[in-house]
Structure formats: C-alpha cells, structure tokens
Amino acid sequence: MFPQIREFLVSGVRSGLRGRSIQVTFVLGLVLIAFAYLTANFSPRQPTTIALDSGFSAVRFTVVLLVLFWIQELLTREIDRKVILHSLALPVSRASYLIGRYLAVVCLAAISIAILGACLLLAVHLASPNYEQGFPVSLGLPYWSVLLGIAFDVAVVAAFATAIAIISTVPVMPLAMGAAFAIAGKALGASVDYIARGADGDVAFASNLGSYLDVIRWLIPDLSRLDWRDWALYGAAPSMESVTWAVIMAGSYVVVAVGLGIHFLQKREFS
C-alpha cells in the first residue's frame, strides 16, 4: 500500500509543481513583502510587530486558498472529468489514491509556507531597520513554530475539503465549503470565549447560543488553538500542554476526515 501511496503522492506533487500554483506563490510572496512593509510604515510604534502580525495572517489566507485550488485540481477535477477512472483501473486501492492525493496537497502547502515564510522574514527585516522596539519580535524558533502551526491548520482544512470533494457531486462545493470551514474554525475559539465570559451580560443570548456552540465544537475544530503568533510577537510562549492538545486535535480531525473520505470513495460508483 505504501508504494502506491508514494506514487500518487509524487504524481500529485509533480502536477502541482508543473501548474501555475508555485508561480502564483512566488508572486504572492512579493505582494506579501510589500504588504507587510507598508503596514509597518503606517504604524508609528512597533512597526516590525505590525508587519509580522499582518504577515502571518496573509500567509495563512494565501496557503488556505492555494490548498483549496490544489484539491480542486487534483481531486475534484479528476472526478468531474472521470480521469480518476484511469487511476482506479490500475491494481491499486482507492484508499491509496486518496491518501496519496491528500499528502501531495499537504506537501505542496508545506513548500508554499516555506517560500512565503522566507519572504515574510525578509519583509520584517526590511521594515523600519533603524527603529529599535522596546519589545523586539522573535524570529528564531518562535517564528518557525508559528509557521508550523499554520501548516497544521492548513492540513486540517485540506482534510475537510478532501472529504467534501469525495462526497459532493457539485464541483465548486469543496472550494466553497472549505473556505467556510477555514473561517469558522478560526473564529470558533473567539466565539466560545465570548459566550463563556457572559456575552457582555446578555444572558439570553449566551444561553440560547451556548447549546449550539457545544454541538458545533464537535463538528468544527478550534483552529485558533494552532495560532501561536503571540510567542513570536510578544515572547508569550504557549504551554506544552496546550500545544500538545492542539496538535492531537488537528491530527485526530485529519484522520477522521480522510477516513470518511476513504469510506465514501469506496462506496462511490463512477460511470
């Protein structure tokens, strides 16, 4: 099974590299440098902190979009055009096909994060080089840990979109639902905290929405727990316990989502 997964992984990565996605990533990297540099110059205080904060958000936004487009290209389009029949006609399992394609998307995302991370690092160094902040940003291990958290975040979004690509018969559905999932997962933590703190005294709102949030928390993972930017921005390192549970949450959701995708792919008939 592992050689089969490797074949689909390698072919998927090659397909992604042959496309325009990596070229788009380089262009977005240049835009990212300009964006972070400009935001730093608009801030009279803590310019490198502002540049780094906005840059992390830009990296996550960019890679999520790239991942959704790669899933459209490597899964949705192959299913829609019946190209998948050529792969499944070989003596390989459907599970190997899906796992290989998912891992290809994750590898392409990792390459993109590395490229954009290097571009962002350059932008932060260029932002107000003659200004010394009272609280300098950390561009060593904390910086790369934040990018690793983004990688886990994107892997979860990719797993969800992969499952939707197998279940859905509408080509645009994985893209639309994947984007909605990425937004909802990121906002879930803030919403839960707001309700837990009493919703600014609105008891009725807190009681009515609280029950729904309990259900949503079982369906959508709290992706904000993978956002460790405070470590790089302010030196506030997350606890090892919170990091461990966040990684376990992400890994568990990936296994469940990809497992569901395999289950539905086994039952799906292509004609």
Image (cartoon, rainbow, N blue to C red):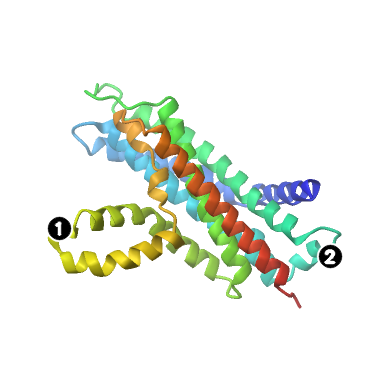
**Which residue appears farthest toward the right when viewing the image?**
91
Reading the chain from its start, which is encountered first: label 2 or label 1?
A: 2
Residue shown at 48%/66% (left/top)? 177
Question: Is 207 placed left or right of 220 in the picture?
Answer: left
Residue shown at 74%/55% (left/top)? 96
Residue type at mark 1: give it: Asp
Query: Which quarter of the figure has residue 228?
Result: top left
Q: Residues within 10 Å of mark 1 (few under 14, many from 20)?
A: few
Q: Which mark is residue 171?
A: none
**Above or below 103: residue 179:** below
Nearer to us of marks 2 and 1 is: 1
Place of residue 120 in the rendered image (x, y in percent of width and height, measured from the top left):
42, 35
**Above or below 142: residue 63:** below
> In terms of depth relative to the viewer, which is nearer, 87 or 32?
87
> In terms of depth relative to the viewer, which is nearer, 69 or 217?
217
Place of residue 85 in the rendered image (x, y in percent of width and height, measured from the top left):
78, 68
Element under disc 1: helix
**Above or below 190: residue 45:** above
User: What residue sits right under mark 2 in the picture?
Assistant: 89
Residue type at mark 2: give it: Ala
Query: Which quarter of the figure has residue 167?
Result: bottom right
Place of residue 234 in the rendered image (x, y in percent of width and height, measured from the top left):
29, 30
- Asked if residue 185 can be seen in this view, the reply is yes
Q: Residues within 10 Å of mark 2 (few under 14, many from 20)?
A: few
Question: Is 245 placed left or right of 136 in the picture?
Answer: right
> In terms of depth relative to the viewer, which is nearer, 151 or 35?
151
User: What residue sits right under mark 1 in the picture?
Assistant: 200
